[in-house]
Amino acid sequence: MATKTKKRVVKAKTEKVKPLVGIVMGSKSDWPVMKESVAVLEKFGLPYEVRVISAHRSPEEATAFASTASTRGLKVIISAAGMAAHLGGVLAAHTHLPVIGVPMKGGALDGLDSLLSTVQMPRGVPVATVAMGGSGAHNAALLAVQMLALADENIKKKFQQYKRTMKQDVFNADLALQKELQEG
Ligand code: AIR
C-alpha cells in the first residue's frame, strides 16, 4: 500500500515537466557526489532526471538511455562514473546530444583511472570532461546550464546574474581580508 502511494507521487512529479538534463551515474555510490549537480540545476530551476546505469553492469540500459534521450526531450547529458569509467563514452556513442563527463574519485588510483578513461576519448566522440569529484559535479551542471542558455534568454540572464554574484562574493572576501589584515 505504502509502495503504491510512493509510486504515484514519483510519476506525477516526472509528468509535470520534461527533464532537459539527464544525469547518469555508474553506481548509487556516486550519488553523494552527484547531488552537487542536482543542487546547481535546482538553483537554476531546470528540470532533470537522475539514473543509475552502468556501462558495464547494465550496458543495454546505457544504450537505450542514450539513444532515446533526444526524443524524450533531453538536451544535455551529465555522466558520472569511477574506476574504468566508460559510461560517458558509451552514452556519447549513442546520441548526438553533448555529454559532460564527471570522473569519480575512489578505487586504488583515487580517480586518475576515471579521469583518463573519461577525458581520453578517441577523435570523433567527445566527452566534455570536468574536474574529478564535487567540483566537477558542480561545474558539469553549470556547463549544462550554459549550453541551455544558448537557446534560452531567461536561463542566460540567470547565468549572468550568477556570475555577477560570484564576482561580488570575491570582492567581499577580499575586502574582509584587507580589513582583517589592517586590524590585526
Ligand atoms: N562503475 C560502475 N559500472 C562501471 C563503472 N566504471 C563505477 C561506478 C563507481 C565505481 O565503479 O561509477 O564510481 C564503483 O562502483 P560500486 O558500485 O562498486 O561502488
Image (tube, rainbow, N blue to C red):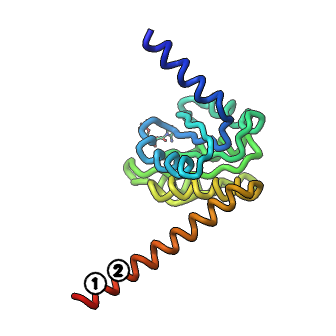
Instruction: Name the image quarter holding residue 126.
Output: bottom right
Q: Amino acid at mark 1?
A: Glu
Q: Looking at the rendering, in which quadrant would you find the N terminus?
A: top left
Mark 2 touches mark 1? (CB < 8 Å)? yes
Instruction: Name the image quarter holding residue 90.
Output: top right
Residue closer to the observer: 173 or 100: 173
Mark-to-mark CA distance, 2 and 1: 6 Å
Q: Amino acid at mark 2?
A: Ala
Residue closer to the observer: 36 or 124: 36
Which element type, helix, strand or loop, lies under badge 2?
helix
Q: Is residue 177 left or right of residue 122?
A: left
The label shown at residue 180 is: 1
> Which residue is the site of mark 2?
176
What residue lies at 33% left-to-right and 82% top-to-bottom? 177
Q: Is residue 157 left or right of residue 176?
A: right
Q: Is residue 111 above or below residue 167?
A: above
